[in-house]
Amino acid sequence: MKDVPGRFGIFGGQYVPETVMNALIELEREFNSAIADEKFMEDYRYYLREYAGRPTPLYFAENLTKKLGGARIYLKREDLNHTGAHKINNVLGQALLAKRMGKRRVIAETGAGQHGVATATAAALFGMECEIFMGKEDIKRQALNVFRMKLLGARVTSVDGGTGTLKDAVNEALRHWVAHVDDTFYAMGSVVGPHPYPTMVRDFQRVIGDETRAQIMEKTGRLPDYIIACVGGGSNSMGIFYPFYEDKSVKLVGVEAGGMGLDSGQHAAKLSRGSIGVLHGMKTYVLQDDEGQIMPVHSISAGLDYPGAGPEHAFFKETGRAEYVCATDEEALGAFLALSKEEGIIPALESAHAAAHAMKLAPKLSEEDIIVVNLSGRGDKDVESIADLMGVKL
Amino acid sequence: MNRIDGKFNYLKKAGQKALITFITVGDPDPETTGELVVAMERAGADIVELGIPYSDPLADGPVIQRASDRALKAGTKIATCMQTAKSIREKCGIPLVFLVYYNSVFNYGPEKFAIDARNAGIDGIIIPDLPVEERNETAAIASSCGIHLIPLVAPTSHERIKNIVEGAGGFVYCISSKGVTGVREDIETDIKAYMEEVSRYTALPRALGFGISGPDMAKRFRDCCEGLIVGSAIVRLIEQGKDRRRMLSNVCEFVSRIKEVL
């Protein structure tokens, strides 16, 4: 499957300025040596357990299952992690690696602010200087997370260029890294970017799938029929998919942001509607016009508002190992409300996309069937914008 | 012979260094781009880089990002860039190099891109986000069209320089400092040592770019290399020029002041 490191079939690669090539090569070497080092992995597992609060539960959503009257639905509770989402798994790994490499500064991009908060958290924990790049539109939309990052001691830099959203924040973080490559570690937030990031982030997120596998075996004595997860860049989905790669009976379903509908042009469905291109150092599916200019994207959830998918997802799509579908803003909102009312769990709007697809699928299946939904984050951050959408004044 | 090689041969005999200037096609419009090239040649530019505007120019600082945005908003397409190059070529013989991000080439089709560029009179292509690891296919296609795929080296490249310059033609684009394009107050890299390092691996002309602010810096580095590349400082004059005639004369005056010291 992967004869060349950093390539997933034709996808992946390193389309970046020469200035950072040696830094990427060094990062790859250090990462490979770290994950083969039992002491490093011991530290990583220690912080996952004692600091992030892992393992997260695999919860049988009995009420939702009954209401839908079909497949049994299990929720992988990544929302219960410290800082409220799966992002911390990856950040703890990368921050430990940065420390091991002797870097004193860590930078990151953020869209909704979850990865920014997780990075600021790890920087505070390990005593590193931290700068977060965030689009100016997102800074307006996510004021609470901006303040959280500042409380944690991070500097938040507004990115005015382009569309002022996540894609531009990645551009600016990469530009900053090119200029400060000697003392700065770039903690990429998803399975995107140039090699080795897609591989490294996947390996730091696969703990989700590894735990899920053990937990579902213990609870039901067998593997699930479906695993459903949302795809922005694709780190929570790749994290839960990857350990099931060889289990062909397990259907992997990635749910993209359908926004206002695929025909509206207002969506972020790169795997469903995009074409192959190069963005942020990787060859993958992107939303672009016929000249290769990256197009503006839309989603109700800022975390899915990104025009490219991780290259390994592109490979999973191309080979048919995973299926990629969409949930619209409206469907995600419906699932957000349903999970809140039925299970007492307020999910992140990102994760609500995965739940929305599960709610469509479950009634068509029998009660023998098992669906696992990756509940990648909690919805506290979204409460204000949901209230706004519902016309409720807080 | 490729016009770039011809130009460097000529300059060597004349005891001069090359002045390579950069502007973005379509900023503010394609006609002005054409006029700028002709005017810069008269003012002393030896080679002109034509930037193809892109939505996500990773290697560029704010000045060239804004130029790209302006050009895209004005409706500049790749076909516009080909057409602009062609009409420049009808007017003058200056070597022309496209600066283009890889996704533009990839979507246009590398083969078609190289053929159309050659037919438009383009002599070289610079792709700032295509490192040596990814360039083989594109390099072969460009070379079959008689176009140089200009290699880029950085102060961080060191032992990588050997592979980067291998089989390359035209000149070596030597990035002066870590970071993106844009005028700098100062350049901290030890340019002399860096240029010597590059010359250990290749006899190709070395052109230094990124951050070159004007005649003073050009004077400081002229003896270390075979050419200097000036981009953002010129693009800024275009951005600030409210009156078209004034803008053209400002650019010409600036270009000739740099050429004087080379």
Image (cartoon, rainbow, N blue to C red):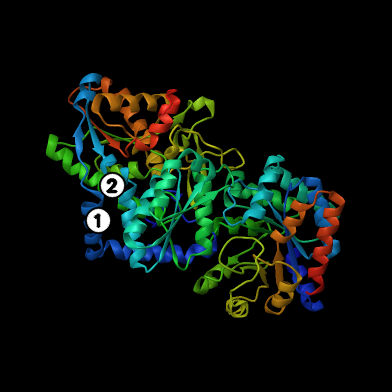
Q: Seen in the image, is A4 located left or right of residue B96?
A: left
Give the quarter of the figure containing the N terminus of chain B: bottom right
Residue located at (45% from left, 33% from top): A272
Does residue B93 appear in this view? Answer: no
- Residue B23 is drawn in which quadrant? bottom right
Q: Seen in the image, is A97 located left or right of residue A147?
A: left
The front one of A344 and A264 is A344
Sequence-wise, the earlier of marks 1 and 2 is 1
Disc 1 is attached to a residue of which chain? A
Q: Position of residue B217 (x, y in %)?
A: 71, 72
Q: Seen in the image, is B10 located left or right of residue B151?
A: right
Q: Position of residue A165 (x, y in %)?
A: 52, 43
Disc 2 is attached to a residue of which chain? A
Above or below: residue B14 compared with residue A7: below
Q: Position of residue A217 (x, y in %)?
A: 15, 39
Q: What residue sits right under mark 2 in the picture? A: A82
Q: Residues within 10 Å of mark 1 (few under 14, many from 20)?
A: some
Task: Give amino acid for label 1.
Answer: Tyr
Are discs 1 and 2 both within one chain? Answer: yes
Name the mark on residue B235: none
Task: Give amino acid for label 2.
Answer: His
Residue located at (19% from left, 26% from top): A62
Q: What residue sits right under mark 1 in the picture? A: A47
Above or below: residue A324 compared with residue A173: above
